[in-house]
């Protein structure tokens, strides 16, 4: 019996519409070859809707998301002026309590990477830390940002990361700066250690964030699951993505107990808007993670296999991979590969 899912689609800004359309094309190809119905519901969000709605995440869009099983989100441009609406991604993560940001980084076939055999996942706490959005100018020229770290949120993300590590290579690395941030990262470290006894088969170690940026370049193949706080996780997942070849390949899942939002790790890359030039694979792999989250393992596996096969063949390569193929040539190649599986 075929199963129907309602999927909210937020195309985003800059290159967002291009990479999202490319992903819809691939999802439609999967739908055509599987016992699966995806009902795409398009919503407004992002920088382009601030002028009309005064916000980058209108109430109607939140209501739309609430009616759906998952959200596919393109990257959005975030204004940087004080007082402007905060990042729509951050708002969605907080509104739906999507506390674990899961960012896999692995070697892809035929893609030049810094080191071979990388297969790690960054699990980033997604609801607090430096992204709490509490900032003050306490005196002219003196700013303060609150880095809120709670035991509750740290335990929750630690549990998620242990569960994931238990299903993988059973190695969890927790990353912090406890030598300087003794209270906040002390709470985070204690939470990881408190969850550890429930997972005796998972080996744990810890690394300071500054050393981690070095280890990710020197020995990325030695990591399995990495769990860390919000900003540290954002930084090292971009780094790990580039170590495996390109930010244009890295997808992320934002997972809570009742909802999931799926997006590329990269941003809206405004300078490439409308050029049909960027790599859509990061967003297509977000589509793969979404189907996997929905329990549609076979359909998800088709996307993954199609992406790997297209990369392995090497005939279609976007500029970030050293080629000259367009965004649509890449998505057409992946969609037609899906149909042939
Ligand atoms: P960015 O990720 O948009 O771009 C950085 C560089 O990465 C690009 O110039 C490009 O060289 C490369 N790149 C990114 N995506 C690529 C792709 N698909 N294919 C090939 N190369 C790619 O980062 P930025 O310039 O710091 O941010 C631009 C905007 O995006 C900002 O407004 C930022 O706030 C926003 N942003 C949004 C999200 C999100 O929606 N979740 C995430 C990160 C940044």
Image (cartoon, rainbow, N blue to C red):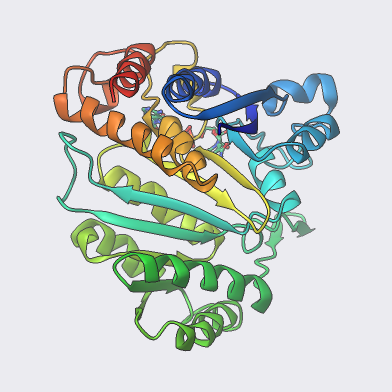
Asked whether residue 12 appears in the rendered view, the answer is no
For residue 285, above or below residue 9: below
User: Quadrant location of the N terminus?
Assistant: top right
Between 303 and 126, the residue placed more toward the observer is 303
Left or right of 150? Residue 26 is left
Residue appearing at x 54%, y 24% in the figure = 16
Residue lying farthest to the front in this orientation = 1
Q: In which quadrant of the rendered view does residue 210 lie?
A: bottom left
Residue 125 in the image: x percent, y percent? 56, 62
Residue appearing at x 52%, y 23% in the figure = 20
Residue appearing at x 42%, y 30% in the figure = 284
Q: In which quadrant of the rendered view does residue 310 lie?
A: top left
Residue 215 in the image: x percent, y percent? 26, 64
Left or right of 51? Residue 191 is left
Asked whether residue 61 appears in the rendered view, the answer is yes
Left or right of 295? Residue 114 is left
Between 70 and 3, the residue placed more toward the observer is 3
Residue 91 in the image: x percent, y percent? 72, 45
Residue 5 in the image: x percent, y percent? 63, 34
User: Quadrant location of the C terminus?
Assistant: top left
């Amino acid at each position: 019996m075929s199963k129907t899912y309602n999927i909210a689609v937020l195309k985003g800004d800059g290159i967002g519409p291009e990479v999202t359309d490319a992903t819809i094309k691939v999802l439609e190809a999967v739908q055509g070859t599987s016992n699966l119905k995806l009902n795409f519901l398009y919503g407004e969000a992002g920088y382009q809707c601030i002028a009309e709605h005064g916000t980058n995440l209108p109430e109607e869009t939140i209501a739309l998301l609430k009616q759906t099983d998952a959200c596919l989100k393109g990257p959005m441009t975030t204004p940087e002026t004080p007082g402007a609406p905060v990042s729509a991604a951050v708002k969605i993560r907080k509104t739906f309590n999507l506390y674990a940001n899961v960012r896999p980084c692995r070697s892809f076939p035929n893609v030049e990477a810094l080191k071979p055999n990388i297969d790690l996942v960054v699990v980033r706490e997604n609801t607090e830390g430096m992204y709490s959005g509490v900032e003050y100018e306490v005196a002219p020229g003196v700013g303060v940002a609150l880095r809120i770290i709670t035991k509750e949120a740290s335990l929750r993300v630690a549990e998620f990361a242990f569960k994931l590590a238990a299903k993988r290579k059973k190695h969890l690395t927790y990353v912090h700066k406890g030598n300087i941030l003794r209270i906040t990262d002390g709470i985070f470290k204690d939470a990881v250690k408190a969850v550890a006894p429930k997972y005796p088969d998972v080996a744990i170690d810890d690394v300071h964030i500054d050393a981690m940026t070095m280890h990710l370049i020197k020995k990325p193949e030695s990591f399995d699951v990495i769990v860390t706080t919000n900003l540290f996780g954002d930084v090292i997942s971009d780094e790990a993505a580039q170590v495996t070849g390109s930010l244009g390949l890295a997808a992320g899942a934002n997972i809570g107990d009742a909802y999931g939002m799926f997006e590329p790790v990269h941003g809206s890359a405004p300078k490439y808007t409308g050029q049909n030039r960027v790599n859509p694979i990061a967003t297509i792999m977000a589509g793969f993670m979404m189907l996997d989250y929905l329990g549609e393992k076979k359909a998800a596996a088709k996307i993954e296999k199609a992406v790997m096969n297209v990369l392995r063949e090497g005939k279609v390569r976007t500029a970030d991979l050293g080629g000259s193929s367009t965004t649509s040539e890449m998505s057409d190649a992946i969609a037609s590969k899906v149909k042939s599986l």
